[in-house]
Image (tube, rainbow, N blue to C red):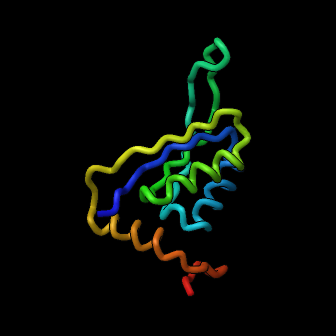
Amino acid sequence: MVKHLIGLLTFGSEEEARKISLKILEGKLAACVNIVPVNSMYWWEGKIADDREYLAVVKTTETEVPGIIDLVKREHSYQLPEIIFMPVDAGSGEYLDWIDRTVNSKAKITDNGQNF
């Protein structure tokens, strides 16, 4: 049985979030990425930081996680980017099947979004 995961990635700009999310999608490493503006508060270098960030919510399968982690570490501007994955314990069977078909198809995508 395929294990589905939700990934959380944060970025300092919408542009960077979109750029890396597009690479994830083009590589068929995920079926969907939502990008949401968030206010983040966290400890960094002994102080509490309060920043505007962009959260990418990634829907994928367990087999694609290493590729996503490698891509994000290679492309991200942060010294220590947030890269977290959590299992999906339940969900719409049709939606989870769509994730499987999308991630596993590895088909090329044309400019108009059609598989060939």
Name the quadrant containing residue 45.
Answer: top right
Q: Is residue 101 above or below residue 20?
A: below
Task: Give the x, y percent position of residue 1.
Answer: 29, 63
Task: Give the x, y percent position of residue 104.
Answer: 46, 72
User: Which residue occupies the foreground of this view, 110 or 50?
Assistant: 110
Name the quadrant containing residue 24.
Answer: bottom right
Residue plotted at (62% across, 51% down):
70
Residue plotted at (41% across, 73% down):
101
Q: How many labels does the image show?
A: 0
User: Which residue occupies the foreground of this view, 77 or 71?
Assistant: 71
Residue plotted at (28% across, 56% down):
91
Q: In this view, does 11 lie above or below 22?
A: above
Position of the C terminus, as image quadrant, is: bottom right
Task: Give the x, y percent position of residue 37.
Answer: 58, 41
Seen as rendered, the residue at the extreme bottom is: 116
Name the quadrant containing residue 113.
Answer: bottom right
User: Which residue occupies the foreground of this view, 111 or 23?
Assistant: 23
In screen coordinates, is 11 left or right of 56? right
